């Protein structure tokens, strides 16, 4: 079996330096870490996790907390990409991930008790509103990072939802639309509230007779909920001619509902999504949407959490990642009166 002594001999470093490099100690240079890890891979070195945990008084486990009940579990394209980038950086630093869903927490009385049971060193809260034990977790000594607002005590890395939503709705108004509606995400999700605020800010800035907006709230961020919300909008005496959806999956469901009713996109109604997941470029018509920089969100969450684990970051400030409006074929200038 390959040991750190074998790696040290080939690398020309002391066993102590090799151990520190493999465990991502901050006093070891990046170049040394790269060299040691490359030789470790070459020799087929596999660390003994139990021995490492005993030596460092750490479990080397990071929990990823998510809520399956809003259509935002780890299979959702938005969160899967964030988690993938987070995973790459965390594993590079020598940690392993465990996934903690709301239902797992329920089987152990609360999420916090499950985290104690698994002995995690830290937790990434990917999406977890209204999860039992979340407040206890936040108030504990377990470092936490989040990709949506959960508490003033937890640093958060997320998209600039308000500005992104406002930019999308401003674009619809710039195309001549007068009645612009919003298919919002689940009302208890922080991102939904922020996108509603961005939508309302744009509506109030334009000459409309509906200052509170035309809003249909979806129960989940998924295709079915978008389909159902669009049906309700189409049943209105005066349906909107422009619609901003809080996610691309909601927008795809809305397009399907419109097609079923003989309503053409973008000839009759223009639609904008939010996320820019892969399918947005291939749905017919291709979807104009607000792109979130998911890779940067995931990587930044990982970097901040690693600093917290090293005791180098105690800020609970949020970091807002800019969005970008991607123009495709689901919007058209309004030709009506």
Image (cartoon, helix red, strand yellow):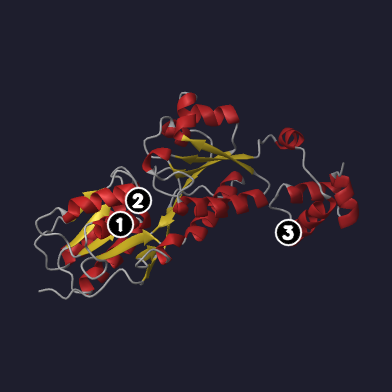
Mark 1: which secondary structure?
A: helix
Q: Nearer the viewer, mark 1 or mark 3?
A: 1
Above/below status of 9 relative to 270? above
Is residue 194 visible in the rendered image? The answer is yes
Are the residues tagged 1 and 2 within 8 Å (C-beta)? yes
At a point 39% along the width and 44% down the height, the residue shown is 71
Find the distance from the CA under tag 1 to the CA under tag 3: 54 Å
The residue that disc 2 covers is 223
Find the distance from the CA under tag 1 to the CA under tag 2: 9 Å
Q: Nearer the viewer, mark 1 or mark 2?
A: 1
Closer to the camera, 100 or 232?
Answer: 232
> Is 37 on the left or on the right of 320, as rendered?
right
Q: Earlier in the sequence, mark 1 or mark 3?
A: 3
Mark 3: which secondary structure?
A: loop
Q: Circle 2: is it few (<14), some (14-19), or many (20+) Cα within 10 Å?
A: many
Q: Earlier in the sequence, mark 2 or mark 3?
A: 3
At a point 89% along the width and 55% down the height, the residue shown is 10
């Amino acid at each position: 079996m390959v040991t750190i002594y074998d790696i040290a001999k080939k690398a020309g470093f002391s066993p102590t330096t090799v151990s520190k490099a493999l465990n991502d100690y901050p006093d070891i240079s990046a170049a040394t870490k790269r060299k040691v890890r490359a030789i470790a891979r070459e020799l087929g070195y596999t660390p003994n996790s139990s021995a490492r945990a005993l030596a460092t008084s750490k479990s080397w486990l990071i929990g990823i907390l998510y809520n399956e009940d809003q259509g935002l579990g780890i299979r959702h394209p938005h969160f899967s990409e964030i988690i993938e980038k987070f995973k790459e950086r965390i594993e590079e630093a020598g940690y392993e991930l465990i996934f903690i869903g709301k239902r797992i927490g329920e089987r152990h009385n609360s999420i916090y008790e499950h985290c104690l049971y698994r002995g995690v060193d830290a937790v990434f809260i990917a999406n977890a509103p209204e999860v039992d034990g979340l407040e206890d977790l936040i108030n504990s000594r377990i470092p936490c990072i989040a990709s949506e607002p959960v508490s003033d005590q937890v640093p958060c890395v997320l998209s600039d939802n308000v500005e992104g939503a406002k930019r999308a709705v401003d674009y619809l108004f710039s195309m001549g639309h007068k009645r612009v509606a919003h298919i919002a995400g689940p009302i208890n999700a922080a991102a939904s509230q922020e996108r509603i605020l961005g939508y309302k800010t744009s509506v109030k800035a334009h000459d409309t007779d509906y200052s509170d907006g035309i809003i249909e709230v979806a129960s989940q961020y998924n295709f079915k909920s978008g389909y159902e919300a669009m049906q309700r909008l189409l049943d209105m005496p005066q349906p909107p001619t422009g619609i901003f959806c809080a996610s691309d999956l909601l927008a795809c469901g809305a397009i399907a509902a419109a097609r079923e009713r003989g309503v053409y996109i973008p000839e009759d109604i223009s639609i904008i999504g939010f996320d820019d997941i892969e399918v947005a470029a291939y749905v017919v018509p291709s979807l104009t949407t607000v792109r979130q920089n998911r890779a940067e969100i995931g990587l930044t969450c990982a970097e901040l959490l690693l600093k917290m684990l090293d005791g180098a970051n105690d800020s609970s400030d949020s970091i807002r990642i800019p969005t970008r409006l991607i123009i495709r074929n689901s919007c058209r200038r309004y030709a009506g009166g």
